[in-house]
Amino acid sequence: MKSKENDERVARMRHSTSHIMAEAVQCLFPEAKFGIGPMIEKGFYYDFDLPRALAPDDLPAIENRMREIIHQDVPFVTERIAKEKARKLFAAQPYKLELIDEISDSTATIYRQGSFTDLCRGPHLASTGEVKAFKLTHVAGAYWRGDEKRPMLQRIYGVAFAGQKELDDYLSLQAEAAKRDHRKLGKELGLFSIHEEIGPGLVCWHPKGALIRQIIEDFWRAEHRKRGYDIVYTPHIAKIDLWKTSGHLEFYRDYLFPPMEIEGQQYMLKPMNCLAHILIYKSQLRSYRNLPLRYAELGTVYRYERTGVLYGLARVRGFTQDDAHIFCRPDQVEEEVTEVLNLAQFMMSSFGFGEYELLLSTRPEKYAGTVSMWEEATGALKHVLEKLDSHYEVDPGEGVFYGPKIDIKLKDAVGHVWQGPTIQVDFNLPQRFDVCYIGEDGLEHNVVMIHRTVLGSMERFLACLVEHYGGAFPVWLSPVQATIVPIADRHVGYAHEIESVFRNDGIRVRVDDRSERMNLKIREAELEKVPYMLVVGDKEMASSSVSLRLRSGENLGSESVPQVKSRIMAAIEAKS
Amino acid sequence: MKSKENDERVARMRHSTSHIMAEAVQCLFPEAKFGIGPMIEKGFYYDFDLPRALAPDDLPAIENRMREIIHQDVPFVTERIAKEKARKLFAAQPYKLELIDEISDSTATIYRQGSFTDLCRGPHLASTGEVKAFKLTHVAGAYWRGDEKRPMLQRIYGVAFAGQKELDDYLSLQAEAAKRDHRKLGKELGLFSIHEEIGPGLVCWHPKGALIRQIIEDFWRAEHRKRGYDIVYTPHIAKIDLWKTSGHLEFYRDYLFPPMEIEGQQYMLKPMNCLAHILIYKSQLRSYRNLPLRYAELGTVYRYERTGVLYGLARVRGFTQDDAHIFCRPDQVEEEVTEVLNLAQFMMSSFGFGEYELLLSTRPEKYAGTVSMWEEATGALKHVLEKLDSHYEVDPGEGVFYGPKIDIKLKDAVGHVWQGPTIQVDFNLPQRFDVCYIGEDGLEHNVVMIHRTVLGSMERFLACLVEHYGGAFPVWLSPVQATIVPIADRHVGYAHEIESVFRNDGIRVRVDDRSERMNLKIREAELEKVPYMLVVGDKEMASSSVSLRLRSGENLGSESVPQVKSRIMAAIEAKS
């Protein structure tokens, strides 16, 4: 309870800081028109209509004025006034007038501190002095009420915390996160690019990124085969009628690419892999003895996302799902979902994710099938979660149109939360496509389908890995695992000898035989986040050893070639 | 010269057999109208307009009549007559009249044997008795003059050879080829399917086909990495402007899928992977020291082929090329082409193809770039072929629009020829896209691009493998490498023990533990073309052995479990 009170206090403080910022802006820009200024996660924002565009320099000036207001410790005073009175009070504030018009009540609540009055339901702190630690972070454009036909306002974002230490911790985590931004590191490390000439949200995987992807895919495929999955490949386009039958065209229309017409037939890029898997299933008669069948595919799908929401590899238009569809009998659903959860947890721990959240998403507003189907499917998922004694939250109305789902959100090293594995139970498509098996009773029964990914997509998962590890991938995922640095040209031959020993064991090693200074080579290998640097000079040649250095800068001194090799092989094996 | 004379004689004989068939049809259908009846590879056809559709039973009747005509040994007599006279002679033959009208000369040549006269330039045999061996094979519909707006005629196909033995050999090879048809075996062996609901030419790879594909792809990737290729992944769609710049839109329009419009931009399914590779190359400055760069991708491309030409996996609309683009300096072209040829030959021999033809395709009618560019590129390819002392043929005008190419055609076990690897030298796209490197002179120079595949496409290559091996894949490619057949239920435990020993070494093994008779299990495993069948009963259990049987039916008798395991591992290792 203590923590909840604290949360509320911090929320109130953030909201109050937004009013203090508005007062500061009013001082500096008396002509300012005010939009809204809510609290958000970690802080607040306020939207302003200002006579000129804000420059980065304006933020310190606003902050200074805010500090003065806080120092003055003026009280927040609230009052309930008639709407008519409010209209007069905000006569010069068109956005506020619009908000007043929408109040259904006959009165409006205002909050006042010092010279600034705002239309606001509160609650607020007792006085401005209670704000302990804040910082304005950035400015962005924002349409009034999010409507692109309304005026574009300037939104100032800030963060606020209960104390200076929390703020400092947050800011340094942010600075770390910015360093780890996968868009920045993706370019620096040569992992991927997105080209205007190809189109937004369409990813080219460069050699190093593609190598990491291939390692992930190989691992994924091997693990799936071990666990009784069959891998398939299916086309990226299909006749649109399939998605009429499935309901995607009806429920998912906003995310579909436009159709292409060939010989009088409309074809569409697939937004999901499920329908082709259904056709493979249906290509022969299946008995209850054959089930479950598990079809897995690294299937590239295309979904239309507005340009505005695209974000590096994390939100794209074309992405490769590590998809699978399990066709099973109703009595097998719980065991299959349990096994998928086990696999998902195994995958997450293999890639170094210890923290995650479980979310159960239930029936959305637009859904296919009957309510009783949904209840049955949701019940099955709940039962599995409870049996596994997993803590989970319910995310109401966030299921896919064809069924409820369990989502797993991964927490990365800087606390960001990523959409990870997802498991969906579907009683619906099997009915629409008449997907059956012959039961022990000799009759046809609908299968249950489980849609699932255990990584999400190759694109988003790489983004998440990059930020989790800050680009310093574990050895098994590192594109280059070791760089050998000969000190002088006379050591190059020895370097290549070690290279060939390492290569024979599959270690990805490279000799930096450029005629550059050793320190430059080491610095570049560190920037490239190569896990091991093996420096070789006269002493090392004489003793068949290397001088070993880690990308952290740590110097491990001299080690024999077999020792270093074993060390690297052990790290690869341990996925550490 | 002897052989050429023979060829001409056989050609004449095939053409004459076509006339004999026409005479036989005239006897059986006096109302028949005659189209044309040329010689083709291995035989001949003739198009007829008949009062009813031919049934399979009609062919033996026609053959019998033909045999009588041959037995009568009547002479072929030719005559040159005035066109007017010809018009009278063929007054009842509208198709012949149409042909007569098109003769620019004032006379026409006719050939007559017995009661049958044809408008024909010849040449023919001296008499019908010289036909030694023929067979009518099938009937198909054919539009008059290939024009779908003209009448549909019935085309009877036949084959004819210099002697009965050649005919018998040919027919038995054909029977074998029919058994090996990848469309038939693909279904029987559960390799792939093509669904009307998805669309023609769009392939779903079933678990066993996908497993073979994955083995091929893994092998391909590992071999490419070894040889200094970098693997990349690129999107399946891109803005259409890219293909305007490249020239594909101009030179390749008939094979492109229609565009999709998103946010005012036209996007298109990629027909080739080259352009994204160019953009990856161009994403940073490259020096002459960095070259060659070799980007490889198992890239799925989409090309519009008319429904009529689609054929199983051999001709499809969506296919995965084992593609690569080499960016190199002009002085590196020959070495790179040589290395690609080496790689291609290595790949072919790894997959068991010993026989192939080399073709050099030169400038087509529609081409991009200058004639001198074409000559330079063609010269480079020629030089490599000559240096390697390879026998090759020139295929004039068959190059791609952006450059000449070397094609390798594979000959499968029944003599069919398949399009295999292809190597194209391209001076053209580097100019259009300004693909440069900084030379030793500090100036920008255009790279040369080499486009190449060493298998062709996964789809066509699987078709070719299926037919080459008649579905009995070498052990390393077999989806199931060994089936263990317990004789009775009490041997199932022992069977699973062996299974787990084999699995630990990565052998794809399965226990057939159904309660069926041993003979049925063996027959089914043979139909499935499983290389090894391990039968286990009391005797085998007692002696820790198995009774080993091959898919050929050969029985190898008792072998210890480690012996069988080594045998299988050795076969996998040897790719045999």
Image (cartoon, coloured by chain):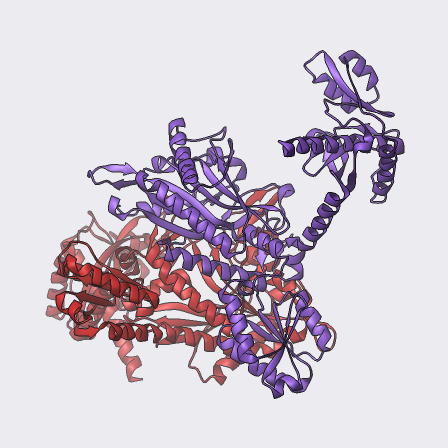
Chain colours: A purple, B red
Residue at position x 84%, y 21% in the image = A92
Q: Is B248 on the left-hand or right-hand side of B305?
A: right
- How many labels sit on residues? 0
Quadrant, the N terminus of chain B: bottom left
Residue A87 percent coordinates (x, y): 79, 16
Residue A236 visible in the snapshot: no
Q: Residue furthest front?
A: A2
Residue at position x 14%, y 59% in the image = B488
Q: Quadrant of residue B228?
A: bottom right
Residue A525 percent coordinates (x, y): 66, 69
Residue at position x 24%, y 63% in the image = B483
Q: Is A332 on the left-hand or right-hand side of A500?
A: left
**Near-viewer residue (A78 or A99):** A78
**Near-viewer residue (A561 or A28):** A561
Residue A126 visible in the snapshot: yes
**Near-viewer residue (A220 or A150):** A220
Residue B328 percent coordinates (x, y): 60, 73
**Near-viewer residue (A74 or B134):** A74
**In the rendered view, would you say A451 is above or below A7?**
below
Q: Is B455 on the left-hand or right-hand side of A497?
A: left
Quadrant, the C terminus of chain B: bottom left
Q: Quadrant of residue B540?
A: bottom left
**In the rendered view, would you say B204 is above or below A496?**
above
Residue B419 percent coordinates (x, y): 40, 67
